[in-house]
Image (tube, rainbow, N blue to C red):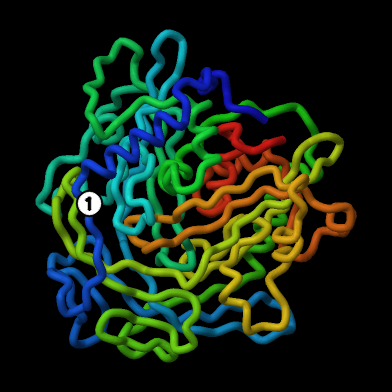
Amino acid sequence: MRASAALTAPEGAAPEDVLAWLSRRADQGGFSVRPVPFAEADGWYFRADTGDLVHRSGGFFSVEGLHVRADSGEEEAAAEWHQPIINQPEIGVLGILAQRRGGVLRFLMQAKMEPGNRNLVQLSPTVQATRSNYTGVHGGRAVRYLEYFMGPRRGRVLADVLQSEHGSWFLRKVNRNMLVEADPAADIPEHEDFRWVTLGALGRLLRHDNAVNMDARTVLACAPVEEGADRALHDDTELLSWFTGERTRHRVRARTAPLGAIPDWVREEDRIRHEAGRYFEVVTVAVEAGTREVARWHQPLLRPCGLGVTAFLLRRFGGVPHVLVHARPEAGLMDGVELAPTVQCTPANYAHLDAPPPFLDAVLAAPPERVRYAAVHSEEGGRFLHAESRYLVVEADAATAAAPEPAGYRWVSLDQMHGLVRHTRYVNVQARTLLACFACGAVDL
């Protein structure tokens, strides 16, 4: 598997140059993010009837309660819990504009400030906008370059697919992931917050911590790749039948509930937290950002309680690289189950249990020579505060490679994964980050 000929390009600018540009934009943007109590969050209030946290405009998003009951069809009892969740019932646009110059395909990337990023400014898609943003609910400036992705086409579409966001924190949230190639002769105006970057440079930037944001990673994962003629362990029909069976086996029933009445969660002046101090908190912040469509605003953010670990185990069958994929149920997913990495968890949330999640120890204890990729990446910085995960690709040890596939897991070739990601809601957002790393050449195969 490799990037298709349509995308292949020299490495271009050194990643250090791009990182220096991001740092300059952060220094020059006049950015500020500070926590504020709920009572000081302008425009946001708790509804008297439900306790839901909503915006006075009725737009953007809300924080509501969720009641979940998950049944795997096995003998063990169904799991049941309550939690806050972000409800944003609108489809955003995540679009990367490409253009070929001198035979080299370049991608127009944005230095975008998001309040939840620990380093604030990261490399983002050309367009990263919710419907509330691009329809002007915020009353700010128009979204630059939106015309290449909405309305009459201004280029050749390389990818266009609806994809889910974080299924544990968003309620049935999807975005339109687009990659559009403009005509080589098109005069595309440049702006100081945007820069052309080649695929090779993106691959090297993905090896740096907190450089390429989640929205750029998910779009890059959907880019076309050249599929090899190598044989996968499971043919496509067998793989899809297994996945359909997993979706059928898991029943995830999630319904909204009044945020003010969900058990086990405590509302304080400046946060909503779980009584055991696990999972995440809901907080509000005051933001100043001179380069955004609106210069000042307040908003809630979800803040996880710990660093996540997200990893694929890797092995070869007949020389063909495969990753161990988990058919993972999540409460906020529209279809209940999507294909996830081998490991996807926040270890701190399991410290009180006798056993860690499957394969977590195998990933964390792997010697350096078996680690093919490692970097810390931010999750969605527009909705989550300092939400970071350590992303890994680890060569499976001999025992794991020789063991039968556990229930809920399958070895899937990279070619198959890149085929599946071009379909709606098959591959979850964490797995798409790692697929972007493969597609851009960031993983040492």
**How many residues crowd around disc 1 within 10 Å: few (fewer than 14), some, or many (20 or more)?**
many
User: Which percent across, then down, holds residue 16?
Assistant: 45, 32
Residue 426 visible in the displayed image = no
Within the image, what quadrant is residue 49 found in?
Answer: bottom left
User: Which residue shows up at 69% across the image and 74% down it?
Assistant: 356
Q: Is residue 354 left or right of residue 58?
A: right
Does residue 409 sit above or below 262 in this rendering? above
Q: Which residue is mark 1?
A: 31
Residue closer to the observer: 301 or 428: 301
Quadrant including the N terminus: top right
Tell me which corner region of the image, top left, top right, bottom left or bottom right, holds residue 340: bottom right
Judge by depth and name the residue closer to the eye, 38 or 150. 38
Quarter of the image containing the C terminus? top right
The image shows a total of numbered marks equal to 1
What residue is at 29 percent from the left and 31 percent from the top? 194
Q: Is residue 156 left or right of residue 347?
A: left
9 is higher (above) or lower (below) than 217: above
Q: Is residue 359 left or right of residue 159?
A: right
Q: Secondary structure at mark 1?
A: loop
Q: Is residue 246 left or right of residue 424?
A: right
Q: Position of residue 123 (x, y in %)?
A: 38, 40
The residue positioned 58% from the left and 51% from the top of the image is: 431
Residue most toward the left? 139
Q: Residue 230: where, in percent of width, then height? A: 78, 30
* Residue 229 at least partly seen: yes
- Amino acid beneath label 1: Phe
Relative to 67, does residue 42 appear above or below in the rendering? Answer: above
Q: Position of residue 152 (x, y in %)?
A: 25, 28
Say which residue appears at 48% left-offset and 59% top-offset. Answer: 388
